[in-house]
Amino acid sequence: MDDLNLLQGLRADAPEPDAARLAALRDRLTSATTATVSPPERRRLWRPLARRALLAGTLAAGLVVALTFAGPAHESRPTRPAPSMRPGSLLLLEQAATAVENKTSSTPRPDQWVYTMSKVVQPGDGRVTTQESWFRYDGKQRADFLDGELKVSDVPPDPDDDDLSPQKYHDRLTALPTEPDKLLAKVSRDRHWSDLPKEDPGAGEPADDRAYRVLSVYLEQQAVMPPKLEAAIFRAMARIPGVKIAVDVPDAEDRLGIGVYYEPKGQQVTTEYLVLDPATYHLLGRRTIWNRDEWITMPGKAPEPAFEAGSFWASAELRSGIVDKPGQIP
């Protein structure tokens, strides 16, 4: 597919725009132990992926497991979107940067609220969850529906917590360089999370891997994104070897978008897409596709399937905006 055909194939009429683990798998991991899950004190947008949730749930259960992978096992496995050649990635990300850099934005008041409605589709059983939440811009309170009733809860300050409020994240974003090469140099050595060791900010992570991951984090934040920085993020991504583009990638709402993904060493067990609106380049959601079977092995037990090839996890932001009080919808 050449660049012109790639661009012509994008749908200009597309609409503008973390979650429970598989119940069956959780039952196997925790030996049928059940638990009541309450909303987190803060929404951790940068750690939502299903494979991370699997590992976290396993460690919480006190189990030692190993994940193993097998080659394709299903003739009917869904076909993943076809990636473009790298020149297409460069062209499309530059087009995204040009489209967003002159947008206008305004900063909310500290006492205003960020409203989001999100949807998640789980791998395996296809279970769908939809959640509404309100998060005060200064981070002091959040609100969620519990048993059909809107509950407002205080969020106590935690100086050691890197899960910043939208207001503090906005301060972090505005301090970043908007020249792509300088931005890339900064995020390539960005410690970013306080639970990573100070002596090794990237915990052994290659610089390109870390740069792509941190830039992806920035695109997902609830804070108002400075337009010049958003443009610089797209241009910095285009400079990372292994960043590729796929077209017609669906989010959890089946809206087709541009899939940005990072694959520096060929196809991995999973491919994780950032799904962008092809008209506005707004982040619609994420999609993770399993390219090979993934198995979970517990001591003394035979391996059990965790995810089959062709399984997917997907998220979608259905609605978002700034409101004056919890319960309001923009």
Image (spheres, helix red, strand yellow):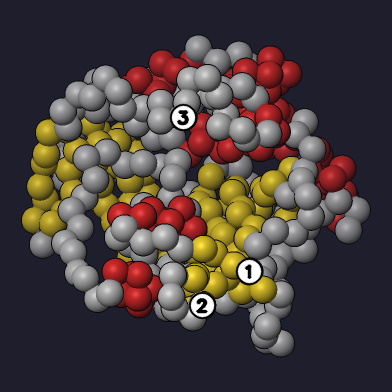
Query: Which circle's residue, 3 or 1, is located before the other in the chain?
Result: 1
Q: Which residue is mark 3?
A: 196
| Cα gap from disc 2 to disc 1, whole angstroms | 11 Å
| Cα gap from disc 3 to disc 2, whole angstroms | 31 Å
* Residue 36 point in image, percent of width and height: 16, 62
Query: Which circle's residue, 2 or 1, is located before the other in the chain?
Result: 1
74 or 101: nearer the viewer: 74
Considering the image in quadrants, where does the N terminus appear? Answer: bottom right
- One can see residue 234 in this view: no
Q: Which residue is mark 1?
A: 69
Q: Residues within 10 Å of mark 3 (few under 14, many from 20)?
A: few
Q: Which residue is mark 2?
A: 303
Element type at mark 2: loop
Identity of the residue drawn at 26% across and 20% down: 159
- Residue 41 left/right relative to 99: left
Quarter-of-image position of residue 233: top right
